[in-house]
Image (spheres, rainbow, N blue to C red):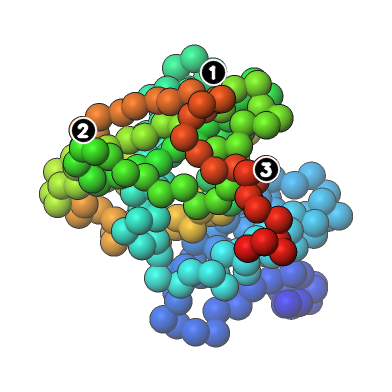
Amino acid sequence: MAVRIEQETHFGVILKEPRFADVFTALAEDLAGRVGDASDPAEQAGVFLGQLARWQKFLSASQEGLGDEEQRGLWGELHFLRTHLLPGMGADAVAGWKGGEKAHQDFQFEAGAAEVKTTLAKRPQVVRITSERQLDSAGWRALFLHVVALEPRDGGGETLPALVASFRVALAGEAAALETFEDGLLAYGYLDAHAGRYAERGYLVRSETTFRVRRGFPRLVEKDLPPESAR
């Protein structure tokens, strides 16, 4: 909305519901930082409206933070990124993280893609594939399924906020990658305002297994589905 400051009209946001003050603070800080980095009024307006639209989409989907399964999923993706991609690719690896965008694979690069699944199950480990496109290797040079078996620990292990903080330290000198990372967190539904809710439970990695998805790998893909009329 338009607000008047010292007789000048500006774009602005106003908190109308006090119980959402923590989320509003995060929104205001994000908008102020991004608009402040823009070079001219036209760019500032575009950044403001674009980022506000992203926040509106996020807030319409979640007011209470991430559920347990979402927390584990985000933890697993960030663990994979930090442990397996950053050492070889550097900060450029962050651009391939698509988990918050609900892409068919959590990581997508020109050279290939990877889907990360976390599980609490003991052996035999079971993971849930959510669509016929997740393990469809058509169009990819290589497709991998990475399974992370986790052990939740209340008061132990590495918490989700601690894992996020480690990325902010690692990417401190990479402004573009850090901004992409923060965008990815927001798209996923992670807000620092909710960090206290995630701070008690940590995770230990029991095991990790990487599978190359190709001919012969057990999967159901789009081309194997029966015609609509036959379902």
Which one is in front, 230 or 36?
230
Residue 162 drawn at (x, y percent):
30, 42
The relative height of residue 154 versus residue 181 in the rendered view (above or below) is: below
Q: Amino acid at mark 2?
A: Arg
Residue 89's disc number: 1
Quadrant location of the N terminus in the rendered image = bottom right
Q: In front of the other: label 1 or label 3?
A: 3
Q: Quadrant of residue 231?
A: bottom right
Q: Residues within 10 Å of mark 1 (few under 14, many from 20)?
A: few
User: Does any portion of residue 92 appear in the rendered image?
Assistant: no
Disc 1/disc 3 C-alpha distance (Å): 33 Å
Disc 1/disc 2 C-alpha distance (Å): 25 Å
Q: Which residue is mark 2?
A: 206
Report the residue at 52% width, 19% height from top.
90
Which one is in front, 3 or 175?
175
Q: Amino acid at mark 3?
A: Lys
Q: Residues within 10 Å of mark 2 (few under 14, many from 20)?
A: few
Q: Which residue is mark 3?
A: 223
Q: In front of the other: label 1 or label 2?
A: 2
- Say what secondary structure mark 1 lies in: helix
The relative height of residue 118 versus residue 170 in the rendered view (above or below) is: below
- Residue lying at the far front of the rendered structure: 230
Q: Earlier in the sequence, mark 1 or mark 3?
A: 1
Report the residue at 56% width, 25% height from top.
215
Residue 108 drawn at (x, y percent):
61, 33
Q: Residues within 10 Å of mark 3 (few under 14, many from 20)?
A: few
